[in-house]
Image (cartoon, rainbow, N blue to C red):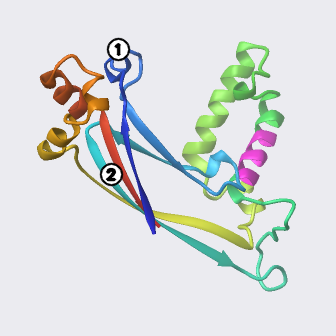
Amino acid sequence: FGFNIQLYLDNYEKAAYTLDFSYGFSIIIYDQRSSWSTAKVYDIPLGTEANMIIRKTKSTQLPYPFSNCYPNDNNHYYHQRNCINNCFESLLKEECGCDYNKNTCKSLTQVLCDFRFYNYYYHNIYPSDQCAQKCSIPCNRLTYDISISYSKFPSDNYLKYLIQDEKVKSRFKNEKESIEKLKKGMVFMRFYY
């Protein structure tokens, strides 16, 4: 199974003058029952064809006493990453009295405490800390294995074909401009699943 998408970013030149470091399109893949924190993001640069193979794997474990997994129910979808984030926020609030990302820090001392805590947590103890130990894996999990390859797009022959289309022609002043802008502003994506 699969599908294809061809996109043209008409104002890519304007995007080049913003404060962004790059421009193109982003593909976000995640289980819609879980939060954005579980998302995988893939950037597709302009002038590129991207072939993305997506394989979804569902894992199921039996709950306690057979394993230490967290059972999901139909009303609540548990994700380990969310549990760890919530645990971290509780530890942060306990340590610093605020959370900078939620704009609850009232003093410079709290802001500095918050930054030190984030830095220490993510660089030193994250994998084996008390939050990771407290938050077990879910009994039912979806994971996505993604392979992606890139090639230059569009080909010269495809450009010649495109500029014959009246709708495409009408967007540009002349053929030379249309070829250059199409080369720099197009993306073609193929998704296989």
**Region in magenta:** 82-91
Q: Is residue 88 magenta?
A: yes
Q: Residue at x 59, y 36 (%)?
A: 119
Classify mark 2: residues with Cα within 10 Å, few (<14), some (14-19) or many (20+).
many
Identify the image quadrant of residue 120: top right
Q: On the picture, is 113 further left or further right than 24?
A: right
Q: Position of residue 192 (x, y in %)?
A: 42, 64
**Mark sitting on residue 17:** 1
Mark 1 or mark 2: whose residue is earlier in sequence: 1
SS category of the residue bearing label 2: strand
Q: Is residue 120 magenta?
A: no
**Mark sitting on residue 50:** 2
**Mark sitting on residue 162:** none
Q: Position of residue 43 (x, y in %)?
A: 40, 42
Q: Is residue 119 above or below residue 53?
A: above
The three-letter amino acid code for the residue at tag 1 is: Tyr
Q: CA distance from mark 1 to mark 2?
A: 25 Å
18 or 98, which is in the foreground? Answer: 18
Q: Residue at x 64, y 76 (%)?
A: 59
Q: Position of residue 181 (x, y in %)?
A: 23, 26
The three-letter amino acid code for the residue at tag 2 is: Ala
Disc nearest the viewer among 1 and 2 = 2
Q: On the picture, is 151 further left or further right than 14?
A: left
Q: Is residue 139 above or below residue 8?
A: below
**What secondary structure is the stretch in magenta mostly built from?**
helix
Q: Residue at x 66, y 22 (%)?
A: 112
Q: Is residue 45 above or below residue 35?
A: above
